[in-house]
Structure formats: structure tokens, C-alpha cells
Image (cartoon, grey):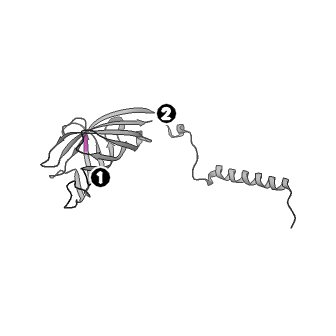
Amino acid sequence: MAKLSENTLAAHFIFTIFIVSALAENGSSFARTMDKKVLGMKKEKLSHFRLYWHDIVGGKNATAVPVVFPSRNSTTAFGMISVIDDPLTMRPELSSKMVGRAQGFYSAASQQEVGLLMAMNFAFMEGKYNGSTITILGRNTVFSKAREMPVIGGSGLFRFARGYVEARTHLFDPATGDAVVQYDCYVMHY
């Protein structure tokens, strides 16, 4: 077998690099860098929303339905999971203008305190943000005065959203379990 010269090996190496690069640029790679303007992303802005979340757990118009019940021994409802479709209104009164719905679930995820794992979308149904959502995923220790949870994404006008929400209980009825919670949402988006 003939021995290849150093020049031939170098040329072969350069040619191989060229072919691999050309294939990657022609779509054989699953990822690529993009200019954000291609997606219509302009200047990033911060928006603030104040909404009231109405969690109705009983009666004929329940908006939170338990799908997994807690352990009998638990004082914190540990293990409970409820699916929600809660109204989001502009004022604390349920009769005030509804601007969206909180859809998702919460789960009692703490054995030491009433601490929920919240996973929900705020689906907006009014005005400029109609059809857009923000996604919230985080820990909610419901008997704390103020609770922060991260905004981890969104859709529509909230694509690439990030931020946080601050929840404060406005009203809690221990007899029914119903609650009205004020949500202040701080969302960075394009």
C-alpha cells in the first residue's frame, strides 16, 4: 500500500471538514442559530397584571376537582391532586369582568405544611392578550402571606415569557375550601 504524503493527508482533512460543515449548513443538523427578528421579536418589555383567581372546590359550579385524594393520616393533604379551570377576574368579586381562566392542576406536595405544587396556564380571553397564555410552575405555601412562583413560558403575545407571580390570599372560606387569591404577574416578553 502506498504511503500518503503529508500534503495529501492535510488536503483530505481539509476536504472532510469542508464536507461536514456544508452538510451541517444544509439542514443535516437539528439546531441552528437564528436572528430573533425572524420570529417577529422586537424589544423586550415588562408587563404587570393584577388578577383575581377564584378557586371553587364545592357546589354545582366547582372549578377545582380532586382527582387524587390525600392520605387519611395527613394533616397537610399530602398526595392530593386537583385539576382546575378557575376564573381570572379583574376584581375580587366573581361577578367582575372575567379576563381569562387558570387551567392546570395543583398537588399537595409537602408533608410538613400545606404546600402546593402549582402547574397552570393563565389563558387570557380578553382584549389585546386574547388567546395568549403564561405558564406558571412553582411552590405555593398557601398560608404564607405572599408566595412567589416563576413564570416559565407562554404563548401568543407571551412567547419566550419569563418572570414571576406573587400570590396573596384575598379570601379563604374554611367551611367550603373556596378561595380568592390576588395574583400580581410580572412578565418579561417581546
Q: Which quadrant of the rendered structure holds the N terminus?
A: bottom right
Task: Give, as a single range, the part of the protein colored magenta.
Answer: 87-93
Residue shown at 41%/36% (left/top)?
188
**Residue 88 included in the magenta stretch of the image:** yes
Residue at numbered disc 2: 42
Q: What residue type is disc 1 on?
A: Phe
Above or below 84: residue 189: above
Crowd band around label 2 with a 10 angstrom C-alpha radius: few (<14), some (14–19), many (20+): few
Q: What residue type is disc 2 on?
A: Lys
Residue shown at 43%/42% (left/top)?
159
Residue at numbered disc 1: 105
Q: Please tell me whether mark 2 sits on a helix, a strand or a loop.
A: loop
- Residue 123 percent coordinates (x, y): 33, 44
Q: Earlier in the sequence, mark 2 or mark 1?
A: 2
Which marked residue is nearer to the observer: mark 2 or mark 1? 1
Out of 172 and 42, give the one closest to the viewer.
172
Above or below 74: residue 43: above
- Residue 186 percent coordinates (x, y): 36, 35
Visible residue check, residue 44 = yes
- Residue 51 percent coordinates (x, y): 27, 37
